[in-house]
Amino acid sequence: MVRKDQLAGEGAFVFGFDDFIFLPSYIDVEPADISLVTKFSVNIPIAMPFVSSPMDTVTEGEMAIALARSGGIGVIHRNCSADEEAEEVMKVKRAESFIIRDVLTIGKESTVAEAEKIMKEREISGLPVVEDGRLIGIITGKDVRFSNKEIRTEQAMTKDVVRVSEGITIEEAERLMKDHRIEKLPVTDSEGRLSGLITYRDISLRDKFRNATRDEKGRLRVAAAISPFDMDRAVKLSKIADALVVDVAHFHNQNVINATKKIIDNVSVDVIVGNLGSKEGVLDAVSKLERVGGLRVGIGGGSVCLTTQITRAGSPTLYAVTEAVSALEELGADIPIIADGGIRNSGDIAMSIAFGASSAMMGYVFAGCKESPSPTTLIGDKHYKLHRGMGSESARQKRIVSDRYAKLSKSIAEGTEKWIPYKGYLADVIEELASGVRASMGYAGAKGVKELKGNARVMKVSSSSFARASDMQTIK
């Protein structure tokens, strides 16, 4: 990887993405064969180095589902109540699974109208009917459509239910559903108690999204943003999310570090800390905290962040990555680094990896996608979406209104908001990003993320570099 000490001959300077380009190198595979497999955190591998930022105009359930299916991972924002954030996390965990464990059920005395309401609200096509935990039937959308809405579910449900036991394989379940022409397969124990549900939709999605980021139960993975000072929210979310991301602008703060230590001591999932921008900050964080799951680095570089303009403080993302790498090398630690802020394209992502990052967190790149929370707005003859920084005045005010535990640590806003062009479906954006990163890696002579970190050579670029090639200086 490119390290800061390799640039010592250039004099001390803080640098960003526009300061370097890759020096083309030999490679013996085609870009399509290049692997993008990497790590989001110590215990979470991902097939694509793409992470969505915990911003309220970027990542809620829909974005996190689409990104996990594409091989990345989303971080649900915390600009809402703890219950609302937990519900967005659960949308992701319920989106698909081989065996659904938190099965929505209904009692035999409930009405068909009540069953219909649950199906519409939860966007599902059927409900197991249980009595004292035992499966007695199943009511589907078809049953609801052709029944009187006032009768009990017991009268409308299908009673002769095909069911299976624990230990069934995906192939066996798929064959049973095809043989019986059914879409739901309840899982019961020896006494008939419902323990799970298999759906044909989930099985088909596993085939469609083979590179999806899934947990050991086949559910999509998702991370959740937290404040280091909200233990209740952290503990609540740690029970359902795959990782927690401490979400503060300046992590190198003794109160923040102390509070994060308490959270790490009380949860079992990976805890990613940040944002950090200096070697000293990373040394302090990793030395004082046990079980750091990942580092989020970069301060003031975001497209809707005003921190550097207002405070003249910051650490450009690429520079922050090298600072983190230097600290980890000194500590002998192997912790994934997430490059966060100012990433505009696939070349920036590849450059982040070359300098030592494992993945790239993006807000602006994803905010214009269909799956982002902001509504699409027509301005003139083009469609746009609103994107705002979490330090903007409007985002700060929403935090106060939606979460009674929220406190504003600063009296000045450090973010802004802007309208950005609508980009369409996330899957198309991801495909373009992945192709671009692979192309960059091909030029750099790397077959995978590890090789890009170890072998890439870059050139320092002067202001007139593309006009006069002699202005480029090679750095190995």
Image (cartoon, rainbow, N blue to C red):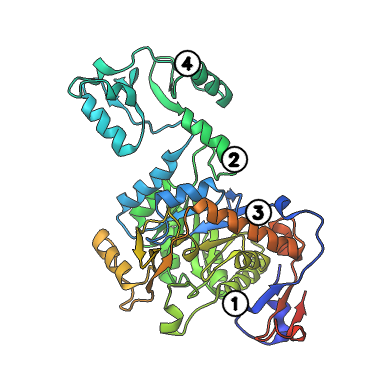
The answer to which image quadrant residue 121 occupies is top left
Of pointers 3 and 2, the one earlier in the residue sequence: 3
With respect to residue 159, does 35 lie above or below?
below
Name the residue beneath numbered marker 1. Answer: 16
Answer with mark 3 or mark 1, whichever residue precedes in sequence.
Answer: 1
Helix, strand or loop under label 1: loop
CA gap between label 2 and label 4 equals 26 Å
Residue at the (80%, 66%) spot, across then down: 25
Mark nearer the N terminus (2 vs 1): 1
Mark 3 vs mark 4: give the one in front: 4
Q: Nearer the viewer, mark 1 or mark 4?
A: 4
Q: Secondary structure at mark 4?
A: helix
Q: Which mark is residue 36?
A: 3
Residue 313 on image: x %, y %:
47, 82
Residue type indicated by callout 3: Leu
What is the crowding at mark 1: few (fewer than 14 residues within 10 Å), some, or many (at least 20)? Answer: some
Which labelled disc corresponds to residue 210?
Answer: 2
At horizontal 67% and vertical 86% (from top left) the residue drawn is: 464
Q: Quadrant of residue 338?
A: bottom right
Identify the amino acid type marked 4: His
Decide: few, some or many residues near mark 2? Use Cα within 10 Å; few <14, some 14-19, many ≥20: few
